[in-house]
Each structure stands twice: as C-alpha cells, then as structure tokens.
Amino acid sequence: MPAEQMAADDGSRPPARPLDSIDRDILQILRADGRASIRSVAEQVHVSRANAYARINRLIEDGVIRGFSARVDQERAGQGASAYITLKIVQNSWRRVREQLQELPGAAHIALVSGDFDVLLLVHTEDNRALRELVLTKIQSIPEVLST
C-alpha cells in the first residue's frame, strides 16, 4: 500500500493554494484518465498546453495530486476474492497495527473508523481459501488485534 495513502498531514509543508474551476476540471479529467495527455487536458479545459502543464505541476507540488496509478481488475489479475474486514484493536495501537497490516499480501486500503469497530481493511486475495487463511493466521496473529 502506498505510504502516501496512510500519511497524515503533519503540517511540514505549506497549505495548498486555493483551486479554481479550471483546477477542479483538470482533477476531474485526471481522475477519469490518469494517462490523459497535457494536450488533451488543455483542450478540454480551454487553456494553453503550457498553462495546463503548469497547473498540473502546481497541483503535484502542492500535494493535491499525490500520484498516478492504474485501476486494476482484481479478478483478471488473479485476485478473485475481495473483502472488507473489520477489526477491533487495542486502544492507542493504531500505528503499530497499521504497519503490520500494510505488510499483508493483498492489503489495498486501511481506514481508521469510529463505531463498533476500529479499523476497516480492504483486501484482495486469490480465492476464499486464501482470504480465510489471511484472516485466521495473519490478521488474528497480530497481538493488538482483539477481534475480526
């Protein structure tokens, strides 16, 4: 799991500059197609290529755009079983648990939540047998995990 998905804003960088409607349109285009060319983006938002290039670079520098990735069809990639797993953990153990969950094969997203459980974990595994093994032997063996 990419570290930037888990990183909290620690205040070490200046706040992002306000976004205008063109910036928001650029973000929408890149969300739909992260491989869109600068030329295509510029044409769609009606600005010059140089302007589009500068805006995208600014969005990256400001941390608004944290990276580009591929949307993977998990089943076609051999990960036919996907599941959200809820966990109850020992109070104040979030950072230690997060580090261990990030190491799990197939961990796609980890979220700290409130309510009846503490953590919501999205995993992708080869099949239900691999999912069961992941939960029963790997997740439940983490000392700070109270229940799944």
Image: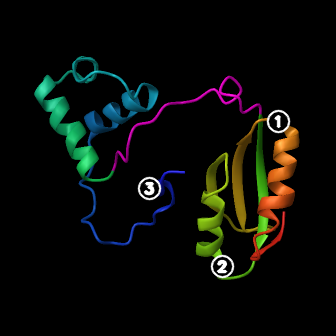
> Going 72% across and 33% down the picture, which residue do you hit?
79
In the image, residue 38 lies at what x, y percent?
23, 24
First along the sequence among labels 3 and 2: 3
Q: Position of residue 72 (x, y in %)?
A: 58, 29
Mark 3: secondary structure? helix
Q: Main secondary structure of the magenta part?
A: loop
Crowd tier of the residue under label 1, counting other residues whose Cα lies within 10 Å: few below 14, some 14–19, many 20 or above: some
If you read the primary sequence from the N terminus, does the residue marked by circle 2 or circle 1 appear first?
A: 2
On residue 127, which mark appears?
1
Decide if residue 16 is on the left or right side of residue 104.
Answer: left
Q: In which quarter of the view is residue 45 placed?
A: top left
Q: How is the image coloured?
A: rainbow
| Residue at the bottom extreme, as displayed | 92
Residue 91 coordinates in the image, percent (x, y):
71, 82
- Identity of the amino acid at label 3? Glu
Magenta-drawn segment? 64-80
- Disc 3 marks which residue? 4
Q: Is residue 144 magenta?
A: no
Tell me the kind of residue under disc 1: Asp
State the residue at coordinates (20%, 38%).
55
Image-based side of 144 in relation to 21, left or right: right
Count of numbered labels shown in the rendering: 3
| Distance (Cα) linking label 3 and label 1 | 28 Å
Q: Residues within 10 Å of mark 2 (few under 14, many from 20)?
A: few
- Residue 122 versus residue 98 in the image, above or below: above
Q: Residue at x 26, y 52 (%)?
A: 18
Q: Nearer the viewer, residue 9 or 67?
A: 67
In the foreground, 41 or 87: 87
Where in the figure is residue 15, as x and y percent of width and height?
27, 63
Residue drawn 80% across the image and 52% down it: 134
**Circle 2 residue:** 93
